[in-house]
Image: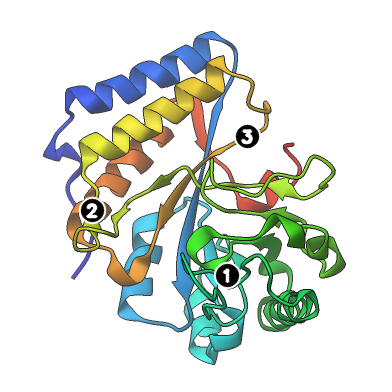
Amino acid sequence: MSYLPRLDAATTPHWTDLTDEFDRWQAAGRVAGLWWRDDDAIAGTRELDLLLELAGHVPLALAIIPGLAEPSLRAALEKKPDVAVLQHGWRHDNHAFAGKKSEFPAGRNPSKVSADLAAGAARLRALFGSRFVPILAPPWNRFAAQFLPLLPLAGIAGLSVMAGGAPAAAESRTVRADAHVDLVAWRTGRGFIGAEIALGLLIGHLRAHRLGPAPPGTAIGILTHHLVMDRDTAAFLYQLRAAVDAHPGARWLPARELLSRQ
């Protein structure tokens, strides 16, 4: 069974709005950059196979949990050389004593954080070689600002959290490669957030980056989780992929390029 739906299913006014926004980027002599990050990979699964099929030629960035990664995951990626590997923490453990979950909460022992970061990067390099792009996508998209100086010490050049919720440190040299649109409705059944909401968020971020003070190299990140992906999410992604492919004012960016665009 495939997730791939028919492209002629529908072109709603909301998709027209996205095309209009791409038109504005093109008229300004610019190209809107989008990138796709998928989280929680640990093994070769049917869900992962469906994700890879759905992504097609798009340069997917797969955030892998290093401490839980199985050999079957490397085998599953062998036929997809364009898939990049990001670091999804160490073991996806919650170390927060209270409040929201985080593997790297404020107040955690810095030496343990440093050890986890280094171990995760080393394991992914050993398993995936040059496919590994040194960007940390921390579990739950949370990473305490006090640990930013530890990232380059572990050989990690970039940080990917949800835009607007990232730690701020003016002196940090870490590249930001944030996600902007999470397609999962985590609080209401873990299904799709809906095409209208997803397009509204996407168009809003594109417009803000076109008109606002965002760095010119910033790319809009789409976030998915293959283990909970449903057909509606897949249908949206397929149509988004087609919309980007069809327009000269937009393109998909590989994760490695994000490190050199800012």
The quadrant of the picture occupied by the C terminus is top right
The quadrant of the picture occupied by the N terminus is bottom left
Measure the C-alpha gap from mark 2 to mark 1.
22 Å
Q: Is residue 247 above or below residue 65?
A: above
**Left-right relation of 59 to 217:** left
In the displayed orientation, state which residue is furthest to the top: 27
Q: Which residue is mark 2?
A: 192
Label 2 CA crowd tier, 10 Å (few <14, some 14–19, many 20+): many
**Can you give x and y, in whole percent of width and height, for residue 97 in the image?**
54, 76
Please state which amino acid type lies under the numbered disc 1: His
Q: Which circle's residue, 1 or 3, is located before the other in the chain?
A: 1
Measure the C-alpha gap from mark 1 to mark 3.
21 Å
Residue appearing at x 58%, y 18% in the figure? 212
Secondary structure of the residue carrying numbered label 2: strand
Please state which amino acid type lies under the numbered disc 2: Phe
Q: Which residue is mark 1?
A: 88
In the displayed orientation, state which residue is furthest to the left: 9
Secondary structure of the residue carrying numbered label 3: loop
- Colour option used: rainbow
Which is more toward the observer, 189 or 68?
189
Q: Is residue 203 above or below residue 75?
A: above
**Left-right relation of 254 to 75:** right
Residue appearing at x 33%, y 51% in the figure? 183
| Residue 218, numbered circle | 3
Residue appearing at x 21%, y 44% in the figure? 194
Secondary structure of the residue carrying numbered label 1: loop
Please state which amino acid type lies under the numbered disc 3: Thr
Q: Are marks 1 and 3 in contact (CB under 8 Å)?
A: no
